[in-house]
Image (spheres, rainbow, N blue to C red):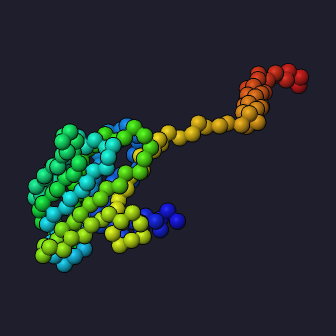
């Protein structure tokens, strides 16, 4: 079932942010991957960053210009890349952000503009739609503590004791028989 969901997500979405899961309060390197499946080039990609996320840096992408959009508090709210993405190719736009401290699902609304003016908005919250919004789950990934049964512990100790006894018997000195 997970494999089917992943296939539907990859084939259904053409603007996806990776990773799809991260840790609360962590600095994370994200990457917006945009695929061009049209017969004309993609010329512009715009992403809006979720509330509670603090974008701090962007990676350089050869052949693409970056415009950073901020609000009145200087919080980065969006990024716009312009360049040329030929058909049947993809590009990745890396950025680093500080995750919110609480568990939450972050949506990454993205707009892809093609030569000729066609615009596709990857903003639909329905993952089965033709234009699903990418999302990242921010949740604690600490594994639950390992619980060990006392019965298993006692059986292991008994087996160890038996093995040590067998080793001691095997290594004990043997007496010499002097009778002819």
In the rendered view, does 159 fall on the left or right side of 177? left
On screen, residue 115 above or below 6: below
Using the image as rendered, state which of residue 52 and residue 84 is in the foreground.
52
Q: Position of residue 72 (x, y in %)?
A: 18, 42
Q: Position of residue 2 (x, y in %)?
A: 49, 62
Name the residue located 36 percent from the left edge and 65 percent from the top edge: 124
Specify the quadrant that holds the C terminus. top right
In the rendered view, does 5 fall on the left or right side of 162? left
Q: Position of residue 145 (x, y in %)?
A: 59, 36
Using the image as rendered, state which of residue 23 and residue 159 is in the foreground.
23
Name the residue located 25 percent from the left edge and 74 percent from the top edge: 37
On screen, residue 48 above or below 161: below
Q: Residue furthest front?
A: 72
Name the residue located 52 percent from the left edge and 65 percent from the top edge: 1
In the rendered view, does 73 fall on the left or right side of 157? left
Using the image as rendered, state which of residue 166 and residue 69 is in the foreground.
69
Is residue 39 among what the camera can see?
Answer: yes
Q: Position of residue 94 (x, y in %)?
A: 23, 50
Q: Residue furthest right?
A: 179
Image quadrant assignment for residue 125: bottom left
């Amino acid at each position: 079932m997970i494999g089917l969901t992943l296939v539907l997500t990859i084939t259904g979405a053409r603007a996806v942010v990776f990773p799809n899961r991260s840790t609360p309060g962590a600095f994370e390197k994200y990457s917006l991957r945009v695929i061009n499946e049209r017969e004309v080039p993609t010329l512009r990609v715009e992403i809006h960053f979720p509330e509670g996320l603090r974008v701090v840096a962007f990676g350089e992408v050869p052949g693409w210009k970056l415009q950073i959009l901020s609000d009145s508090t200087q919080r980065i709210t969006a990024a716009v890349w312009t360049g040329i993405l030929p058909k049947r190719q993809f590009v990745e736009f890396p950025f680093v952000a500080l995750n919110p401290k609480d568990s939450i699902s972050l949506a990454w609304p993205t707009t892809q503009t093609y030569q000729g003016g066609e615009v596709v908005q990857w903003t639909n919250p329905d993952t089965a739609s033709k234009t699903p919004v990418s999302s990242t789950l921010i949740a604690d990934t600490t594994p639950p503590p390992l619980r060990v049964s006392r019965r298993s512990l006692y059986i292991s100790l008994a087996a160890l004791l038996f093995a040590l006894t067998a080793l001691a018997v095997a290594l004990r000195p043997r007496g010499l028989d002097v009778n002819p």
